[in-house]
Image (cartoon, rainbow, N blue to C red):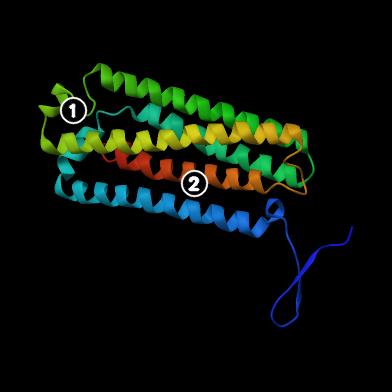
Amino acid sequence: MEQEMAYDALGNSHPITDYKDDYDGEKFGFWVFLLTEMMMFGVLFLLFAINFYRHSEIFALSSGSLNVWLGGTNTVILLLSTYTMGLASLKMRQGKVRVSAYFVGVTLLMAIIFLGIKALEWSVDIGHGIYPSSKILDAKDHGEILFFGLYFVMTGLHGLHVIFGIALMTWVLLLIRSGGIRPEHNIALKNVTLYWDFVHLIWIILFPLFYMIGV
């Protein structure tokens, strides 16, 4: 079957690309999506910086009450998961479909472990009465209220991105199984890998902001 062609005003021919095979379009669209995500987190980082400048000592003191070991463990988990997700994309390009699916599954498992650790950490904080609008937190210094407000908002938003990443990786596994993702057509896997790199990058910034300034 011959490739269908389209012609511009100068008479030059161009092959018509089905939207499902529009590699450049899908890649560009995903980068635009990531740009909007960066802008959203950028505003939050700026807000943190302004309030840290105003309440440096209180922010450092509040940071010291967080569990740096749990936060550090989650950092290592995300670093490893980024590596395994990159391997999944590499193995798919090499034609090793089953190995690629295996590494996506490993990454998915580590993402779930990350959420479990974060849920444990949050439950401890909430058990101590530290959560937005709690009577215990509202009775503290204004800077401490701001710190924990930003902590719950920013780590919570990041957690939602992890959940979305889990959903995307589950979708990718289903596509691999059905043949929707294959070595010659793997843009969905590449985009999900890029998304997971972004999730990892955001946490790499969040960890020192909230956990390390009080060390």
> Image quadrant for the C terminus?
top left
Secondary structure beneath label 2: helix
Please name which of the two marks, 2 or 1, marks the residue nearer to the observer: 1
Measure the C-alpha gap from mark 2 to mark 1.
30 Å
**Disc 2 residue type (three-letter):** Phe
The residue under label 1 is 133
The residue tagged 2 is 198
Q: Residue at 39% across / 23% down in the picture?
A: 119
Give the farthest residue toward the right. Answer: 1
Is the residue under label 1 in contact with that under label 2 (CB below 8 Å)?
Answer: no
Q: How crowded is mark 2: few (under 14 residues within 10 Å), some or many (20 or more)?
A: some
Q: Residue at x 72, y 41 (%)?
A: 181
- Residue type marked 1: Ser
Q: Which of marks 2 and 1 is nearer the N terminus?
A: 1
Q: In this view, does 204 lie above or below 74?
A: below
Q: Residue 56 falls in which quadrant of the image?
A: top left
Q: Can residue 45 be seen in this view?
A: yes
**x and y percentages locating residue 82 in the rendered image:** 56, 40
Identified at 16% across, 41% down, the residue is 57
Location of residue 136 in the rendering, given as x and y in whole percent from the top left corner: 14, 22
Of 14 and 51, the residue lying toward us: 14
